[in-house]
Amino acid sequence: MPMPRWWGQVNKRVFNPRALASGKWPVLIHTGRVSGTTYRTPLDAHPVDNGYLFVLVYGSRSDWVRNVLAAGQARLCVDGAEIALTAPRVIDRDEAVRVLPTTVTRPPAVLRIAEFLRMDLVG
């Protein structure tokens, strides 16, 4: 896993609430796989052909990733618009680099990010 899990917990409790309040970040709306609770997670969301790509900074074992994979769907709020997404799948760095627009900065190699989540637009 690229980033330590404890940092993810700090991020979840300290930085995510600030990012949500700012309204400047794309927000993924997903349902808890056990609780059924609706969660809102601010993320980097990169548009790709017929969908979006998410950088898995904490790897595919993150709660939000596991929730989305279990549900098979999520919604993404970007600039006030809500976008329905489906068919979540974890892809490797090589595939992510192929589908990301050249204008998107790649995660630094030092972070060792090897997994990305790709989702398709509904319809």
Image (cartoon, helix red, strand yellow):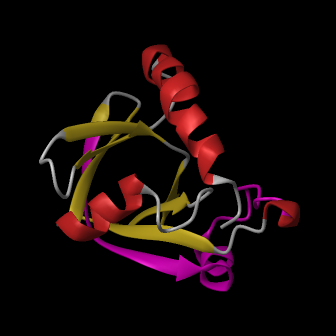
The image shows residue 96, relative to residue 66, as above or below, that is below
Q: Residue furthest left?
A: 36
> Residue at coordinates 47% horizontally, 66% vertically from top-left?
61
> Residue at coordinates 65% horizontally, 67% vertically from top-left?
1
Count every numbered label the image shows and give the total. 0
Q: Is residue 4 left or right of residue 88?
A: right
Q: Is residue 90 magenta?
A: yes
Q: Is residue 19 visible?
A: yes
Q: Nearer the viewer, residue 74 or 83?
A: 74
Q: Is residue 110 left or right of residue 43?
A: right
> Residue at coordinates 77% horizontally, 68% vertically from top-left?
112
* Quadrant in which the C terminus is drawn: bottom left
Please provide percent x and percent y for residue 27.
39, 37
Please provide percent x and percent y for residue 120.
32, 69
Q: Is residue 64 left or right of residue 13?
A: left
Q: Residue furthest right?
A: 110
Q: Quadrant of residue 3?
A: bottom right
Q: Which residues are magenta?
A: 82-108
Q: Nearer the viewer, residue 60 or 106?
A: 60
The image shows residue 12, relative to residue 94, as above or below, that is above
Please provide percent x and percent y for residue 12.
50, 34
Q: Quadrant of residue 73?
A: bottom left
Q: Nearer the viewer, residue 116 or 99?
A: 116
Q: Quadrant of residue 21?
A: top left
Q: Residue furthest front?
A: 6
Q: Is residue 49 visible?
A: no
Please provide percent x and percent y for residue 107.
76, 59
Q: Nearer the viewer, residue 107 or 123?
A: 107
The image shows residue 122, relative to residue 78, as above or below, that is below
> Residue at coordinates 44% horizontally, 70% vertically from top-left?
118
